[in-house]
Amino acid sequence: MVAREILYQLSVDRAQARPTLGRISRAVFAGVGLGLANALALLVPFLVGMLLTAALFLVAIFLIASPLLAFVQDGPTTTYFLELPLLAGLFGLGLIVWTAAAKFASFFVRLMLDRLQHNVKLRTEDKA
């Protein structure tokens, strides 16, 4: 159990030093290995945040690709050219959603790092 706690603290320190998705995932799963309470406190917010981030990026990709998808569906017809201003708006909305997804991803990384650091502090306070 002591070795797991040391590995957990090491993975959190590494994630703090260079925050990447892989390092944060390793730190979360190292924390999950310490017990059921940590699994609920770390894994649930991590999974919800990851799903929300992925959903935002997927929506942005589909909005950005909507003019191309409409062209494939309709071809160069009058309907396509009449819908072109709407499609340009969807493309712009996709760019806005992409930017919001990137901002949310950086916010999520900071949130998970704070949550991991807080969990390390709680575990070290329990030992003292």
Image: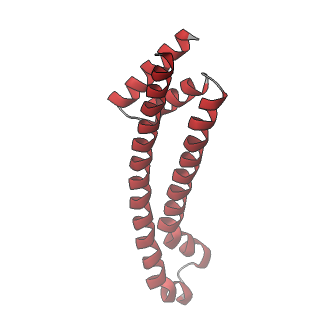
Quadrant assignment, res 75: bottom right
* Residue 40 position in % (x across, y down): 63, 36
Q: Can you say which quadrant of the picture contains the N terminus?
A: top right
Residue 122 at what x, y percent from top left? 48, 27
Residue 128 in percent (x, y) is at: 46, 16
- Which of these two is toward me, 56 or 125? 125
Q: Residue at x 41, y 35 (%)?
A: 20
Report x, y in % for residue 2: 54, 10
Of 19 and 121, the residue lying toward us: 121
Q: Work out which residue is located at the far right of the displayed protein and give it.
A: 36
Q: In the figure, 4 relative to 55: above or below?
A: above
Vertical order, 39 against 79 (above or below): above
Q: Is residue 52 above or below residue 9?
A: below
Colour approach in the figure: secondary structure
Position of residue 73 relative to residue 44, above or below, is: below
Residue drawn at point x = 44 percent, y = 33 percent: 118
Q: Find residue 101 and report its image quarter.
A: bottom left
Residue at image location 50% in from the left, 89% down from the top: 82
Please state if 35 lies on the left or on the right of 12 as rendered. right
Residue placed farthest to the front in the image? 128
Residue 114 image-quadrant placement: top left
Seen in the image, is 39 located left or right of residue 56?
A: right
What residue lies at 51% left-to-right and 85% top-to-bottom? 83
Count the marks.
Answer: 0
